[in-house]
Image (cartoon, helix red, strand yellow):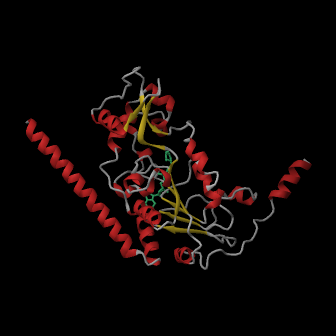
Amino acid sequence: MDMLRALFARNMALPRHHAPVLEEMTLNGIAKYIQSGKGKRILCMVGAGISTSAGIPDFRSPGSGLYHNLQKYNLPHPQAIFEMSYFKMNPQPFFTLAKELYPGEFKPTVSHYFMRFLRDKGLLLRCYTQNIDTLERVAGLTDDNLVEAHGSFHTSHCLGCQKAFPLTWMKEEIFKDNIPVCDECEGLVKPDIIFFGESLPQRFFQCIQTDFSDCDLLIIMGTSLVVQPFSSLTNRVSETTPRLLLNMERSGQTDPIMAALGLGSGMDFDSENAYRDVAWLGKCDDGCLALAELLGWKEEFEALVTAEHSRIDEELTTAKLQGATIGAHHS
Ligand code: APR
């Protein structure tokens, strides 16, 4: 009993009061923090909400979220579509869904380009993404800028002999409605996205060793922060590092019970102890544009997005024309 009493005594200590690290607990306060030269090693943590405006549904938004629209697959439960045991038994639902969601038809969003813009200004320490759509790469972020915490379609491997397969091969198999099978051992080939129960990529564990203690501003966009271990990353930054959430809803807050026990260290946007966490609720594309405007970057940033989207449109048009031309020769 004494041990329990000691534990509660130690943990019931009220959360410590901190001097504010922002002039104001608003997006403007974050902009001023960056303009003051403090926010120059910015970490971004992102989820499916930054790709919804590109036409890729997120997972949990009521109605539109993927997990609310998988009835036709007769899954034991929605997340089974990303579980290894179910995938090995019945890979069809995953590959049917992959075809529906296949990136490459989608353009990176304003939020993707905001991270590219931060990188071009030398302010992006790293982007930690939970997304598998590779749109961060299409937006111009490189391997070094990225931690793809839940893997991506970028590469695939045979579950039998581990043979590697490129995205081009996997895309062809998916669009031929094939179940991708290894040409060496006839094993099932799976894109390198992390299924529930699989360990995250080694790079994730390497980069978190120093990134979160090095960063001086954390920007979290488009994620419900319900999946571990990714979500707990928000607590790895130092106590004086501001954290900005750009999201349709609050997420990542301290669980009230844990807070009462002084155990939780999620984000605190609203209590009288709030001193560094800012929630800007709305579409993350609008939040990025608003922040860019406050920083005097609006015109330059909008020019980047426009130029990039025009380039992608031209590439898609050329590809379609080439496809049509090739088709014409063969018809
Ligand atoms: N602007 C801002 N927020 C948005 C937008 C938008 N345009 N669209 C959706 N959101 C918000 C939703 O309100 C929600 O809080 O983004 C969040 C998306 O949450 P989820 O659907 O849970 O997606 P995510 O957090 O990325 O899921 C994490 O779960 O299934 C696993 O591995 C999968 O990586 C995924 C992980």
| Residue 212, percent from left and from top | 62, 57
Residue at image point 16% right, 46% down: 322
**Quadrant including the C terminus:** top left
| Residue 177, percent from left and from top | 29, 32
Residue that lies at the very extreme toward the top in this rendered image = 185
| Residue 232, percent from left and from top | 62, 52
| Residue 110, percent from left and from top | 38, 63
Q: Is residue 29 above or below residue 130?
A: below
Residue at image point 60% right, 56% down: 211
- Horizontal relation, residue 1 to residue 19: left or right: right
Residue that lies at the very extreme toward the right in this rendered image = 2
- Horizontal relation, residue 282 to residue 20: left or right: left
Residue 24 in sight: yes
Residue at image point 40% right, 55% down: 51
Number of numbered discs present? Answer: 0
- Horizontal relation, residue 142 to residue 179: left or right: right
Residue at image point 10% right, 35% down: 330
Residue 73 in sight: no
